[in-house]
Amino acid sequence: MKKFDINPTVEGYFGSYGGQILPPSLKPVFDRITEFYLSLRDDAEFLEELMYYRKHFVGRPSPVYFAEKLSAKYGGGKREAGGKIYLKREDLNHTGAHKINHTIAEALIAKRMGKKKLLAETGAGQHGVALATAAALTGMPCEIHMGEIDVAKQKPNVTRMKMLGAKVVEVKTGTRTLKDAVDSAFGEFLKDPENTFFGIGSVVGPHPFPMIVRDMQRVVGEEAKYQFRELTGKDPDNLVACVGGGSNAIGLFSAFLEDEQIKIHGVEPGGKSFNPGEHAATLTLGSPGNLHGMHTYLLQDGEGEPLPVYSIASGLDYPGIGPQHSYLKDIKRVNYVTADDKECLDAFMELSRLEGIIPALESAHAVAYAMKLAGQVKPGETILVNLSGRGDKDIDFVAEKLGI
């Protein structure tokens, strides 16, 4: 069996992707974070504190659930006519998504490093809410940058961040979405990198953040592996997760990469069309380049500048991707596909009405592909979907969109 090393090189590369593409003045700052984290991640006291908060604050482990009626309609369910869909219920975490898995760790690391402020970008607001929650938990000031368009779409999450004590900075430049929120937050970070901890919201950015966030999200896959075996007696045949920056997907995938019999699918936002500016299908249509301190696949013009992107799900409208995903694409370990807006909305409503579970629009992309896959696989074949977030934040937007 081929082995897949999930760890980056000392320089932070997964294959040829990743690294630290930074101004020389910032490299020592990120090197110190790397050194500190590597000394901390096996520290018994740190791990004990992290495990305590995961269990008693976040509510882990999140369950795995057999979506019987969804399976019956799209794959056969009990009739064994097609695929059986299971959900890893990250939507049941405190704050409503997988993001809390890494933000608590980021806050604990920042506090141990003596940092004075937590800073982050957010798209759908789930990372912003999770970091604001972790900041309140650890008693640290917090500032969140969010694009103007996303602020309008995700008002409940903006309110939550403010209630938790975070300062929310509305970004009105560029496309006024996630990429511009990252740019704005990075600009703020440059003002005082010694005292500010940039709590990056996905497996993106300069080393060591793709590694840190991945390590903290691995709990999803590790839990799912033993839960799925307990529930079914075997490993899943297929894994499915939505991919924006890629944290929830890497969290699930990492525990299963070495078993090549398990088919893995990452679902990108196909948006309105494959025309430029109407999707965010980075791995499907992009090419390697540099973005936000890393070398990775991105949607770019002839000059290497990021193209405008779009997704109905604010957390997926990013022109880049985590470098580990770029590597997994190149070695063909993960099959990266797309789901468009209509498929996403259909899946959102189907899961809500068949199973009583309202998913985040981000997660609905994964559900959409799982519904399609269930009708294509062999009878009884299993599909485990990372239901990365719940749809509280999206219900007003979807209701308006569908005229409900």
Image: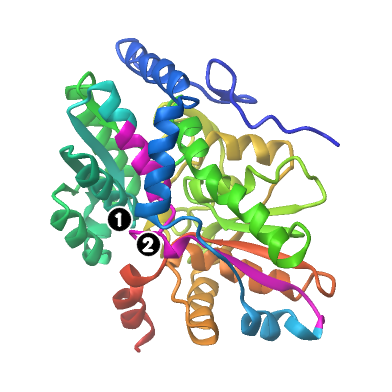
| x and y, in percent, of residue 101 in the image | 42, 47
**Observer-nearest of 250 and 231:** 231
Give the total of numbered labels: 2
Q: Amino acid at mark 2?
A: Gly
Instruction: Please rate how many residues cluster around mark 2, counting C-alpha atoms within 10 Å: few if below 14, some from 14 to 19, many from 20.
Output: many
**Observer-nearest of 296 and 198:** 198
Q: With respect to residue 380, does 246 lie above or below?
A: above
Q: Secondary structure at mark 1?
A: loop
* Residue for badge 2: 96
The label nearer to you, 1 versus 2, is 2
| x and y, in percent, of residue 2 in the image | 82, 34
Residue at 50% in and 60% down:
62
The quarter holding residue 43 reads: top left
| x and y, in percent, of residue 22 in the image | 38, 19
Mark 1 and mark 2: span between their CA atoms? 11 Å
Q: Which residues are magenta?
A: 80-108
Q: Judge left or right: residue 336 versus residue 375.
A: left
Residue at 28% in and 40% down:
120
Q: Judge left or right: residue 158 versus residue 9.
A: left
The quarter holding residue 152 reads: bottom left
Q: Is residue 235 visible?
A: yes
* Residue for badge 1: 125
Q: Is residue 303 visible?
A: no
Q: Secondary structure at mark 2?
A: loop
Is 86 covered by the magenta stretch? yes
